[in-house]
Image (spheres, helix red, strand yellow):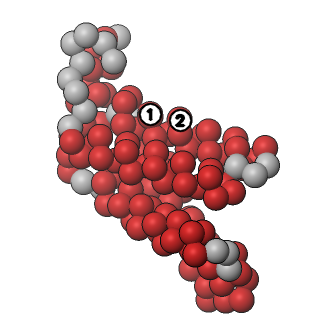
Amino acid sequence: MSEGSPRPPTMVRAFEVVSIISLALAVIFGGAADIGGALFQIGMLVLILLVSRGGYAWARWLMLILLFFGFLMIAATMLWQPDLYREAYWGGSFLEQAATALLYVLAFAQVWLLLRPEMGAWIRSRASVRTAAN
């Protein structure tokens, strides 16, 4: 950030920390097992930083859409292929199961933080800084 840029509010920093922890857990437990998964995780990191540091509204909405589709895919798998769901999400060791539960909690926390009024205010303030700089 430039010299005159304000520090991100606590809510924005909390989003950044929760998101990076979630991303790290996903990578540790197989989210980057192939090149496609690795590229997806890198893309998510870029989105996290575009929201938290850049204050780009489109990145915020794209993250919300991706999280929504992730929840939708998990719910669909739970309903229509419960055996596959149990095997894929809960079939591993206790540590993997704990990480899965923590990832669910962190994903809901990400959505909650992204929808907070403080996040909207931060994004609007960053947009006005970018507009003034041009």
Query: Circle 2: is it few (<14), some (14-19), or many (20+) Cα within 10 Å?
Result: few
Query: Circle 1: is it few (<14), some (14-19), or many (20+) Cα within 10 Å?
Result: some
In the rendered structure, are the residues bearing label 1 and label 2 in contact, judged by CB atoms less than 8 Å apart?
yes
| The quarter of the displayed image where residue 13 is located | top left
Amino acid type of the residue tagged 2 in the rendering: Val
| The quarter of the displayed image where residue 115 is located | bottom left
User: Which residue is the extreme one toward the front?
Assistant: 94
Q: Secondary structure at mark 2?
A: helix
Residue 5 placed where, x, y %? 24, 18
- Residue beneath the point at 21% across and 12% down: 4
Residue of label 1: 50
Residue 95 placed where, x, y %? 57, 69
Question: Looking at the image, is 108 positioned above or below residue 46?
Answer: below
- Residue beneath the point at 44% across and 34% down: 49
Residue of label 2: 46
Q: Is residue 103 left or right of residue 110?
A: right
Pick the residue in front: 10 or 132: 10
| The quarter of the displayed image where residue 131 is located | top left
Q: Which mark is residue 126?
A: none
- Residue beneath the point at 50% across and 60% down: 67
Amino acid type of the residue tagged 1 in the rendering: Leu
Question: Looking at the image, is 28 positioned above or below residue 106?
Answer: above
Q: Secondary structure at mark 1?
A: helix
Q: Is residue 105 visible?
A: yes
The quadrant of the picture occupied by the C terminus is top left
User: Which residue is the extreme one toward the right?
Assistant: 34
